[in-house]
Image: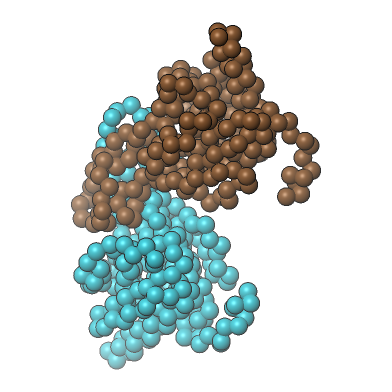
Chain colours: A brown, B cyan
Amino acid sequence: EIADLLLPDVPQVLAGKHITITAGPTREDIDPVRYITNHSSGKMGYALAKASQQLGAKVTLISGPVDLTPPENVKTILVSSAQDMHNTVMQNIKDSDIFVACAAVADYRPKQNATQKIKKSEQELTLTFVKNPDILSDVAHLPDPPFTVGFAAETQNLREYALGKLSRKKLNMIAANDVSNKTIGFNSEQNALTVFWPKGEKQLNIADKNLLATQLMKIVAEKFEETQTEDATFV
Amino acid sequence: EIADLLLPDVPQVLAGKHITITAGPTREDIDPVRYITNHSSGKMGYALAKASQQLGAKVTLISGPVDLTPPENVKTILVSSAQDMHNTVMQNIKDSDIFVACAAVADYRPKQNATQKIKKSEQELTLTFVKNPDILSDVAHLPDPPFTVGFAAETQNLREYALGKLSRKKLNMIAANDVSNKTIGFNSEQNALTVFWPKGEKQLNIADKNLLATQLMKIVAEKFEETQTEDATFV
């Protein structure tokens, strides 16, 4: 695209790095017709994949069902449910330096996935849901985990939830956005993020998701390099 | 489009008729982030709206959330939940001659729609759902109902369910399709239908949804005219 050609040279701060990124929602089947999903459009995750590739990384994008064209020069794997995504991430994560979990993974799935369409007969219907595997936490708790970045989409107490998630899931970084603000986030072209890591934070103001993705991946590159240096100190 | 220009003249069998058509899925919010929906793409309903307009009708299309461009010369109203769709249909149905309920309306909605994102804490989560209003039945049971056409998307016992629905909901016609067949139906460009009315039935073999829509609306036009003649006999 012309816009891309007019961009200044992008610093190759992620050259030689393999980054795995998840994007989009997941779909949890109730029966062959109905499913539970969420408002994630996948735009932020796809922008992160594109930005990472432009910053020099080898990128694997693992995406739930979205209406987006896979970015060029990015290995894109399409999945549907949280369990599919978990399996695919675990199969692909071993040689990743950095993992960015941007997908809005369903926390729960229906306990039973009916093989035939459920007929409506009762005035009320009760469904039981069970917890899905926690992809982000499972990656961060691997014996030799990649630099792991999570996302927190919240409607209230954003900072508290984000910091809790950073610590509880042993993440290197978390990017938090307030999805109660309709002008940013899920289906918008724009977003705003507050990025937290164990020793600091940075506010990324409202901007086009592509620009924001590049800003975020530059911070990831910087903090990733710091962890490499820290590790080296202890050798 | 060129393809449209090359079509033979379409007989204006629906000239002077006002047709209201519903299309697409509905979305039932669980909380600000999550919702229940279904695999309806809206393609069949949009094809029916386009076919009806080309056959001479004045068309109102009431559509759930889909990724389709509204057909030209069709009044399109976008809605989200089953309750939204019910309200919009009821406000628009009074001067309709024909009602075609092609939308895959959610039978149930969550009893409580949480205003804040539900946090995952429990291993299991139980949600209670309540029945949505039955748009098709409510229209067919109006004091002076339009000619009412329903759809039945089933994964088993197609004929039995379709005939039961035709009779129970007092419909003039029902078009049934087998959504367990992945080559037709929900996200496909093609479909196949069995059309039932109180005194007969017709099989419409697998075809492009646009062609199938024209075939179906021609049958609707014919059966609608028969009911008008029958009514006249009793005057």
Q: Quadrant of the C terminus of chain B?
A: bottom left
Q: Is residue B33 above or below residue B133?
A: above
Q: Is residue A3 left or right of residue B216?
A: right
Q: Quadrant of the N terminus of chain B?
A: bottom right
Q: Is residue B26 above or below residue B112?
A: below
* Residue depicted at x 40% and y 27%: A138
The total number of labels drawn is: 0
From this viewpoint, is residue A183 visible? no
Query: What percent of the width, then of the height, locates residue A91?
Result: 43, 36
Query: What percent of the width, then of the height, locates residue A150?
Result: 50, 28
Q: Is residue A108 above or below residue B10?
A: above
Q: Quadrant of residue B22?
A: bottom left
Q: Residue furthest front?
A: A235
- Tell which of A177 and B22 is nearer to you: A177
Q: Is residue A28 left or right of residue B160?
A: right
* Residue depicted at x 53% and y 79%: B54
- Tell which of A13 and A107 is nearer to you: A13
* Residue depicted at x 55% and y 9%: A235
* Residue depicted at x 29% and y 36%: A130
From this viewpoint, is residue A72 visible? yes
Q: Is residue B235 left or right of residue A181?
A: left
Q: Residue furthest top?
A: A234
Query: What percent of the width, then of the height, locates residue B76?
Result: 52, 64
- Tell which of B92 and B34 is nearer to you: B34
Q: Quadrant of residue A13?
A: top right
Q: Residue furthest bottom?
A: B233
- Tell which of B48 and A228 is nearer to you: A228
Query: What percent of the width, then of the height, locates residue B114?
Result: 38, 36
Q: Is residue A57 left or right of residue A28?
A: right
